[in-house]
Amino acid sequence: MKYLLATLPALLVIGAFLAFAHWVPQVGWKPEVAAGLSPEMTPPQLAQVGERLFKGRGCTVCHVVDPAQGWKAPPRAPNLWGIGARSDVAYIVESLYSPQAKVVEGYAPIMPAATNPPANLNYEEVVAVVNYLLSLGGRPSVRIGDIPRPPGGQ
Amino acid sequence: MDYLELGWGFLNSRQLVWIAAQLHLNFAAFVLAVPLFALVIEFIGWRSRDPQASNAYDRLAHELTRLLPVAYGFTAIMGALMAFSLFTLFPKVMNYLSGIFAPSMLVYSLLFIAESISLYLYYYLWDRLQGKRKWVHMLLGLSLNLFGTAVMFIANAWASFMMSPAGVTEGGELVNRWQAINNRTWWALNIHRLVANITFGALLCGAYAAYRFLTSRDERERAYYDWMGYTGNFIALFTMLFLPFLGYWLGFEIYRHNPQMGITLMGGFLSWLFVLQAMVIATLFIGTAYYQWMGLARVPGAETYRRIVPLFLVVLIAAFAVWATPRTMVFGPADPPRHTFSVVFGLMAPKMAAVTSVILLLYTSWLFYRRAGKVLVGGGRFLGNLVWAILGVAAVVIIGLSVHGFFAPTAVRIRESVWQILILAGVLGVTFVLDTLALRGAHTVGRIEWGRVPARSQYVLIALAFIIVWLMGVMGYARSAVRTNWHIDGILQDTSPWVWLPGLGGVANTVTIVTLIFFALLAVSFAISVFSAREGEEVPNLRPTPAPAPAEPRPAEGRATLAPQPGGGNG
């Protein structure tokens, strides 16, 4: 018994850590899987899937979508709110396939291709994300097959 | 078959591997660390000219080694359970890793056998290899450490490859095996684990000593185990000072390998975990410092220093609050990272000020302990005051650089952070030498009285052991979770049903279960160690000798050294 009592303060400290861990927001993580993307889907439907992929495949680690901030306000990567108004489809597609081709001034070239880890998007998923980005200040307008496949092809 | 699905409620395939791996790592850390400082302590005893000190150090090293054989058995059992679970439940991953690392796995096995032989020879030949043959025993200890460290480095190559693969094509085909081993995070992980293991082992030995202290009724034993606990805590505190920088190095290499991974770790969905780990580390540092401060009670005449302790505590807590503040936080599964109140304290400059202040403060605490019960005389008094002045100026300069760096461009801030580290290291080195010179010829007015320490200090030692085991579990999870849905980053995707990552509460539950299992098994190991003690074996006598009258101070005996002095000066 005396051995167990000696551990009581230690168990209380560990209990406090455990309580804190349960008290904070329970932010788990699950990879977003986009099942059933087909050429019949309309651009707005694809944009809805694209939003889920955008939030679930790690894009928000660096980017934000926040109308309250300027587009170059965030520290790691541009705010994508309004990108549909200020950029065309070709620029967005290039930014996803070859993000180092044009880097916004003031930011480090840290973005990997969206078809590489961690996002690891396939072609259909890229189309969905492009539509979502176009919907941020513009109108989604791209169908599967309208844009080129990624270099190397997936 | 990619995966074998196991599901018994809480215990699914992933949980089983997670628990077995963490238990294996905990025991492995213990059996790697203890021989390292047991050998150093044995060496100090071997070279000591004072027979009492020599005997005390040798006995301490032997008692530490006595904890190893059973713990080593548990390490092997947990390692086998982990390997068995991995090869049966995750065959795709293990087949791939075996293909890349097969030769190193063979070397690992051979080194493990060599380590086992060295350990048992080192332990069982302790009494036979004394006197003139002591050097043979030291060689055995050295080989044990070399084999053990090599075993860890090889296993680290596999773990670090999963995080930052190299030497393979984009499709995962092996191109260069050495590059796969010597990947981006390998050395950072090696050194971080090596030092952290020593902290880990030292705190566990401290907890063992605390148990023995609390359960002993014999004054002589209590004095001995108080000294043993102090030694463990001292080693832990010393090595802990390096860990923030080694952790930063590992984080830096992770970021260099994959910036998204680094951001996920510090500012993505793991940001709350990093707040938690900062809290746990803060508790560890503050607990260690608190134990040191309570140790001042052992030294008559240390009241002057004890009065400053509350101020130190406030500064430590404030510094850790800054350190624990992340730059961005995530508040929900689909929420992007946001800036909060952390805009100021989340930046690098305030964190540098916080970490360097903590290190300066802990070092100063140690100097207090070293100076306690001593009166500096002559030139020593000047040197002693010079030490305080240098430390004060260094604190102002380091914090001043952080304030300047906060408003400066990134390149300037990074350059200044390097200067902060250099100034800190230089100041520690210079003041250590000056303090050693100052203590030469100092009058001892209060000699250290081992065993004269509040019982709550021993509860702190036990709590510190639980905290570091819990912390290691949390950090082990972070290192794996940062790969998100990749077994091997960018090479081999996790397509198992357990690809999701739990919230922090779920993580803490598993880590707590692992911690409790580990301590239950460790208690068995410690109990067997106590039972295996020789009948009638007495501990060295470290009880206080009568202090000289203050009116007639006598010179301190011997030089003040970094290591604690059994029955003598303050380490």
Image (cartoon, coloured by chain):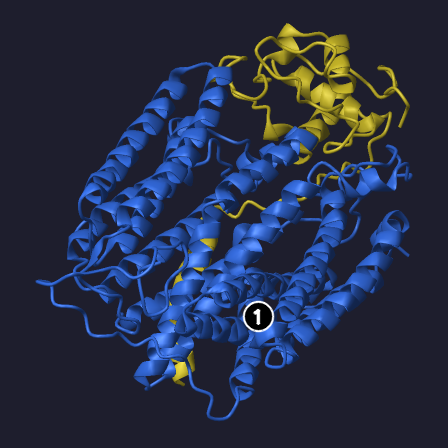
Residue B502 makes an appearance in the image: no
The amino acid marked with disc number 1 is Phe
What chain letter is assigned to the residue under label 1?
A: B
Q: Position of residue A121 (x, y in %)?
A: 78, 30
In the rendered structure, the colour chosen for chain A is: yellow
The picture's colour for chain B is blue
**Which residue is label 1 attached to?**
B518
What residue is rendered at 53% in x and 51% in y? B504
For image coordinates 78% across by 36% down, the residue present is B490
Q: Is residue B495 toward the left or the right of residue B382 in the image?
A: right
Depth check: give the residue in front, B401 or B13. Answer: B401
- Local packing at callout 1 (Cα closer than 10 Å; few below 14, some 14-19, many 20+) is some
**Residue sitting at x 41%, y 39%:** B429
* Relative height, residue B256 to residue B567 (above, below): above
Q: Is residue A126 left or right of residue B566?
A: right
**Left or right: residue B13 compared with residue B320:** right
Say which quadrant the C terminus of chain B sits in: bottom left
Residue at screen point 68% across, 49% down: B500
